[in-house]
Image (cartoon, rainbow, N blue to C red):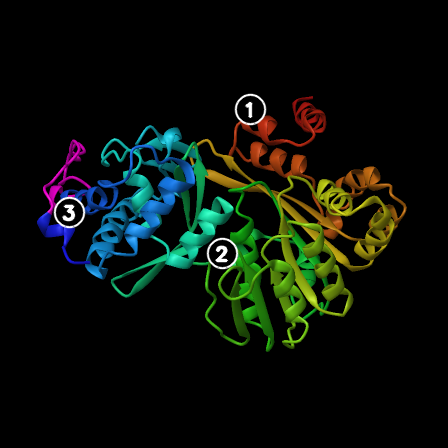
């Protein structure tokens, strides 16, 4: 690049964000000005008739002409924003495209709100900022697939902060969500699982089987899974392979060799990573998500071969998770998958993060331990009977979502309205509450 846009272009600065009551603005005027100069340089020659892919391709090519200093100006600007995100203990940031109104949004304790103390960034400036956060090959993936999952990290005072990003097309622009990955693992002991459950998730006690952690997006599945992996890493001499899209928490090897394979960077797909793991002498294989029939079949195959496999599903209940796996494969394959799943499935943990009375969030969970009766119900296609088995299985460590929500309500942690809102079986929850009142 022959010119340095940071020093040679005139400043086009949008209104400065209002200062916080006790400090300077979150983003200094100089930092914002420099970032705007770079963004303006990238888009200033874009033909007015460009839209959609053509617009994003123009931005991608122009970014490749920038020197490292200019790219760093954009990244430092963005990293100041995510520093603010950490200060507010926000879990997510949303920027870009029509849906944000040009504002920067944070999710704090479950609520997503625009941040008035941060500068506004209209398209196509946000398109430039978002594309500057990834490498040229990743930009190409974004252009080809209209979506890109990626990881991002920041080093600050010797500490590394990691984030999981998703960039995607939205009305000819690019939007992005980025989620903060917990810097410290939640101790496994804090989950207060029954000893039977601990025996199942521990390689020390159970060498094989499929364990599922399920829940909707933002329900803490990854946090729970990382706590389980960390407990194994600290207690057994083994080889753990983690396949993620992207890799979130990076586990430091303690007693185990821990491999991290990011889909799109280290391996092409979850299926490929799972198949390849069979030749890598693993004891534990973590599949970030069983999102398609091919990955499901590969997961069942590697579990069948005597390995311990952990994975996640976007389901809100244990029985729904079983039905989802079976329903993902063609009808002619379902009977075979039903029998294989019944043989290898050991445990399903379904969870939700519920708003508390003090405006934070608490984990509510459903736990299904696969007993002989549960296994028979799966094989016979009688999954509708399993909920009652969970209800009656508390002595074994099982609980329904409704039982745990009732416990949280009874302990004055959540309100009756929130308990009802998050219940899978609202009739059953009302029965539990009415039983207490009577």
Of label 2 and label 3, which has the lower sequence position?
3
Task: Looking at the picture, tell me which residue is in the foreground, 150 or 170.
Answer: 170
Structural distance between the alpha carbons of marks 3 and 1:
48 Å
Residue marked by disc 3:
34
Structural distance between the alpha carbons of marks 2 and 3:
31 Å
Task: Looking at the picture, tell me which residue is in the foreground, 418 or 297.
Answer: 297
Which residues fall within the magenta stretch?
9-30
Give the label, 3 or 1, closer to the camera.
3
Q: Quadrant of the C terminus?
A: top right
Which secondary structure lies at badge 2?
A: loop
- Residue 89 x/y as whole percent: 35, 44
- The residue lying at 75 percent from left, 70 percent from top is 306
Structural distance between the alpha carbons of marks 1 and 2:
35 Å
- Residue 17 x/y as whole percent: 18, 33
Residue marked by disc 2:
246
The picture quadrant where one finds residue 114 is top left
Dominant SS of magenta comes to loop
Residue marked by disc 1:
417
Give the label, 1 or 2, closer to the camera.
2
CB contact under 8 Å: marks 1 and 2:
no
């Amino acid at each position: 690049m022959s010119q340095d846009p940071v020093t040679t272009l005139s400043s086009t600065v949008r209104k400065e964000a209002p200062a916080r009551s006790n400090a300077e603005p979150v983003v200094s005027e100089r930092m914002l000005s420099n970032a705007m100069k770079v963004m303006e340089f990238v888009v200033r020659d874009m033909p007015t008739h460009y839209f959609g892919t053509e617009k994003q391709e123009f931005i991608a090519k122009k970014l490749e002409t920038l020197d490292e200093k200019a790219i760093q100006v954009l990244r430092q600007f963005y990293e100041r924003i995510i520093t603010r995100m950490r200060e507010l203990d926000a879990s997510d940031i949303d920027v870009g495209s029509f849906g944000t109104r040009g504002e920067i949004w944070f999710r704090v304790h479950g609520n997503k709100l625009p941040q008035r103390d941060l500068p506004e960034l209209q398209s196509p400036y946000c398109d430039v900022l978002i594309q500057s956060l990834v490498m040229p090959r990743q930009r190409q993936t974004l252009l080809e697939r209209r979506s890109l999952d990626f990881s991002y990290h920041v080093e600050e005072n010797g500490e590394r902060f990691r984030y999981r990003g998703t960039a995607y097309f939205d009305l000819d622009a690019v939007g992005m969500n980025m989620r903060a990955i917990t810097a410290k693992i939640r101790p496994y002991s804090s989950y207060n699982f029954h000893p039977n459950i601990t025996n199942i998730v521990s390689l020390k006690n159970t060498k094989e089987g499929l364990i599922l952690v399920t829940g909707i997006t933002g329900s803490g599945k990854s946090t729970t899974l990382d706590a389980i992996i960390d407990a194994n890493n600290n207690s057994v001499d083994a080889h753990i392979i983690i396949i993620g899209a992207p890799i979130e928490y990076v586990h430091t090897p303690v007693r185990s060799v821990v491999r991290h394979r990011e889909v799109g960077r280290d391996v092409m797909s979850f299926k490929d990573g799972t198949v390849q793991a069979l030749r890598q002498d693993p004891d534990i294989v973590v599949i970030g998500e069983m999102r398609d029939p091919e990955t499901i079949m590969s997961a069942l195959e590697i579990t069948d071969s005597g390995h311990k496999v952990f994975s996640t599903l976007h389901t809100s209940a244990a029985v729904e998770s079983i039905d989802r796996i079976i329903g993902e494969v063609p009808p002619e394959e379902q009977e075979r998958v039903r029998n294989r799943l019944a043989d290898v499935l050991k445990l399903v943990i379904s969870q939700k993060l519920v708003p508390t009375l003090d405006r934070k969030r608490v984990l509510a969970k459903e736990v299904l331990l696969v007993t002989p009766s549960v296994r028979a119900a799966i094989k016979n296609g009688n999954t509708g009977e399993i909920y009652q088995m969970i209800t009656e299985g508390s002595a074994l460590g099982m609980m329904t979502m409704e039982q745990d929500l009732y416990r949280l309500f009874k302990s004055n942690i959540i309100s009756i309205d929130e308990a009802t809102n998050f219940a899978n079986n609202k009739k059953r929850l009302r029965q539990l509450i009415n039983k207490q009142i009577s």
